Amino acid sequence: MKNVNTIFTKQANDMFKNIGTLIQFIIFPVVALVMTRLVAIPDADMPNNMFVTMKAAMFAGMSLIPVMTNIISEDVERKSLRLLVMAGVKPHQYLFGIGGFILLAGVVTSVAFGLIGDFAVIEIIKFLAIMITGSAASIILGATIGILAKNRQSSAAISMPIAMILGFSPMISNFNETVERFSSVLYTQQINVIVNDFSANFARAMLIVGANIAVLTVLFAIAYKKKGLRG
């Protein structure tokens, strides 16, 4: 537990010094708020929550992947990851320490989205549940890419296309059956489904997101074991 707390505190300090990372957690709800107040609400033909759900899905399914990738790849590039492994830090401790703080920041952002949106009580519960679990999946995926990348430059080149594929697949699936079949097993699709339709099968969506998290966690552990000592 001491290792987790130490890494958690380190990441908190690093994030507040890095404006580029910090702004990722602020810009999406700010844009959602502005667009909701100035565009959605004044337009009677437009759903009030249109921009809230759109930006929320993008935040959880896209932006957190490169954020986490950059953090991990920076540790790899600076050789600090190697020191952590040699100090006895286990994969789950490293992931919980860094990922735990990023997830906490993601929860704060998700709550901000919820406050901006016009949701009923049961809707806000479903919204936060799918946002938090979806954010967790993105964080684990970003960590895995960061571990495997050679440096921050290559991590960005890898994480951005992956984030875009995962983020835009739900939208493309509305027009292409092949993409729809593919994206149905992705956590980003389930985020998109629930935030846009709270009457959808919530249990099924959470099950798929949970399965994604389980698979991604195994992949992270393998990547950490393979590359950690060479980081």
Image (tube, grey):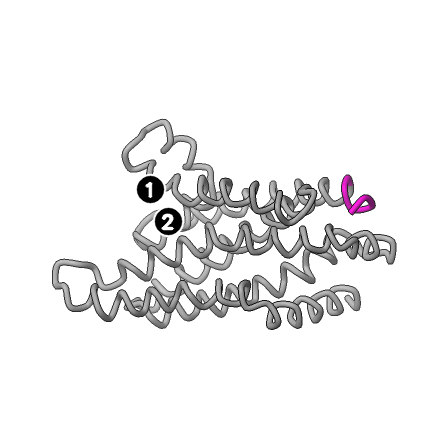
* Residue 103 on the magenta span: no
Q: Position of residue 116 (x, y in %)?
A: 33, 70
Mark 2 to mark 1 CA distance (whole Å): 9 Å
Numbered mark located on residue 129 in the image:
none
Tell whether 1 sits left or right of 88: left
The magenta region covers 226-231
The answer to which of 213 and 160 lies nearer the viewer is: 160
Q: Position of residue 43 (x, y in %)?
A: 14, 64
Q: Residue at x 45, y 68 (%)?
A: 26
Q: Residue at x 78, y 47 (%)?
A: 231
Q: Position of residue 50 (x, y in %)?
A: 26, 58
Looking at the rendered structure, the secondary structure element under dot 2 is helix
Tell whether 205 sits left or right of 225: left
Numbered mark located on residue 171 in the image:
1
> Residue under circle 2?
192
Q: Position of residue 49 (x, y in %)?
A: 27, 62
* Residue farthest toward the top in the current orientation of the protein: 178
Closer to viewer: mark 2 or mark 1 = 1
User: Quarter of the image holding residue 183?
Assistant: top left
Task: Name which residue type carries label 2.
Answer: Asn
Task: Name which residue type carries label 1.
Answer: Met
